[in-house]
Image (cartoon, coloured by chain):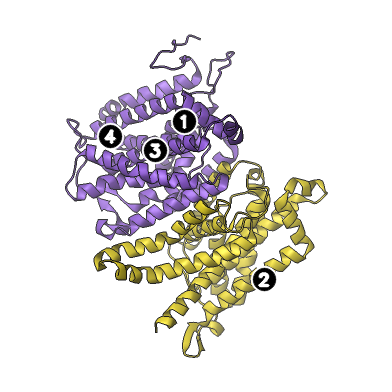
Amino acid sequence: MTTQLALSQLLNGLQLGVLLFLLAAGLTLVFGIMSFVNLAHGSLYMLGAYFGAAAFANTDSFVLAIIAAVGGAGLVGLLLDRFALTKLYARDHLDQVLATFGLILFFNELIRIIWGPSSVFISAPKALGGTIDIGGFTYPSYRFAIIAAGLAVALGLYVLIQKTRVGMLIRAGATNANMVAALGVNIKWLNTLVFALGAALAGLAGVMAGPIVSVQPGMGEPVLILTLVVIIIGGLGSIRGAFFAALIVGVVDTLGRAFMPTIMRSLMERSTADAAGPALASMLIYLFMAVVLAVKPQGLFPANVAATR
Amino acid sequence: MSGTKPSSLWPVAIQWSAPRTVTAVIIIALLAVLPMIASALESSYYVSFATRVLIYALAAIGLNFILGFGGMVSLGHAMYVLLGAYAVAIPASHGVTSGFIHVALAVGVCVPLASGFGAVALRTSGIAFIMITLAFAQMLFFGAVSLKDYGGDDGLTVAARSTLGGLDLTNNTTLYYAVLVTVLLALYLSWRAVLSPFGLVLRATKSNPRRATALGHPIFRYQLTAYVASAVVCAVAGVLLANLTLFASPAYGAWTLSGELIVIVILGGLGTVFGPVVGAIILLALEETLPTLIDATLPDYKSNWMLLLGLFIFFVALLLKRGVFGSLPASVRGERSKPELP
């Protein structure tokens, strides 16, 4: 019974981890190449969930929902990059934080105007509505699908970045964007591509999370902050770091919330444990991050980036 | 033209006719007589609104000290406001109403906490610093949410305002003047600190940390000291905020409030001592009037004023490089002022 519980919590942690990776990958790539801090990345996640929910409500097809979410968020990302953010890339981080903070307020309110303040509904595809049974251990198949899809995207990203010409340019841009531009590569186009790719991944994360979280205005912020923790722990600009850190953060956070109260109860009085347990559980990843930074200020897997300025 | 001679009270000559000085003096004078104007208009609401503006300004003055002069972008300073508010609410719920104890508790908890957070956060710089301060603030936010005995998510009402010797803070006007005096004190102290040798090194760490280190300054100590000092100012703002609203809630530590504090600093003018006051006046006045303004034109969207605020903040970041107060000349035309101060 306990192993069952532990196993399913571990899988929940992995599932949160791969969602965080989808968000962190885009954020860390954008940071690596443009040295740009995009706090509005959570808004793209939210937009993805809403686009997906809207498509799902109209067509009842989850595949179309995914296409709408990825395409819609990617398009918004492209437009943002072209028309709003380009000027900010060369500015200091303070201006970037401020501008994208403004964008968060804007998008949250825009969503509220279009879809209303209450949460909208999107359900898992019917084919994945059941559970999978492995030797007496059951787990929702939709959550399995999220883990599988996330890992597949991670693999795809790895191939894209390590094996293709575009990936080579992205890596080169992360090391020294000016040099790449001097060699005749259209760096603006590369920036737009990376930004739109990151936005599309955020949209994918949003629509996949749609059936298991509540789709509502402001849903992006808690996830955004977790994502920031992930890319800090993983090392800014490092996709590999983002991948491992996302899984670590997902598992630590989920297991902490599930078992911390019980563990605390065995260590101290029940009343104290009941008060301190949940608090410590929600602080766990931040403590973890503090420890990581205290030991390795560059993160666990620092990218070889000149842009850590 | 004429400058007061430097004395022990005024470390530099002040150009009284410089636009920035004139603006600051006019604003302070208006703030000083505001309760009388309000009572003449018989609208006491303005006094409590102005108190709130000044409390935000105080917190922003604290943040500005490290953001404007030290180049440390903290996206988590609302956590110290939260701390200060709970330093009032928790003792008050146990019947301890002395304001001296509240302030002592706020400062007493804030200093070691900020020292610890600062020591870890300052191991990083740039973007990582922004995010780690945000994460620490979230940690404290969730900590406050989990205080089930003290209201948890819903927050905690404070039965009565702090008692502070002979001062009767239950009187709104008295509270207003107490806050105003605190703000003026904070302005004077930060002005002195910025011009002091300490401030000189702090500003050097902003413009070029490597060079400052090469000159032999242990910049970590300077940055940490400045960080803790700015946290204490925010904690005092929290104490005052809990007194004004008679309420303390985890929402005081929400990261959006940290964001708003940065907006205030930038809006006023980064690296100016008086800027945060101007920024707080503009931002809060905007938040106050936008809903009314929209109500007059598009009543259906009255509750969606945040959309415009978001756009406003975006364009402030994009276009307003020096802030409103910062755009005013610091010296009289024709004269070159040495440092861009205050």
- Reading the image, the residue beneath label 2 is A155
The structure residue drawn at horizontal position 24% and vertical position 35%, both measured from the top left corner, is: B172
Q: CA distance from mark 3 to mark 4?
A: 26 Å
Secondary structure under the numbered disc 3 in the rendered image: helix
Q: CA distance from mark 2 to mark 4?
A: 65 Å
Secondary structure under the numbered disc 2 in the rendered image: helix
Q: Tell me if I can see residue B172 in this picture.
A: yes
- Reading the image, the residue beneath label 1 is B275
- Reading the image, the residue beneath label 3 is B59
- Reading the image, the residue beneath label 4 is B43
The tag earlier along the polypeptide, 4 or 1, is 4
Quick check: marks 4 and 1 in contact, CB under 8 Å?
Answer: no
Q: CA distance from mark 4 to mark 1?
A: 27 Å
Taking depth in this image into account, of B325 and A290 the one nearest to the observer is A290
Secondary structure under the numbered disc 4 in the rendered image: loop
Q: Is residue A41 above or below residue B54?
A: below
Q: CA distance from mark 1 to mark 2?
A: 50 Å
The structure residue drawn at horizontal position 46% and vertical position 15%, both measured from the top left corner, is: B14
Give x and y (percent) for residue B230: 41, 37
The tag earlier along the polypeptide, 3 or 1, is 3
The answer to whether dots 1 and 2 both sit on one chain is no
Tell me the chain of label 2.
A
Q: Nearer the viewer's eye, disc 4 or disc 1?
A: 1
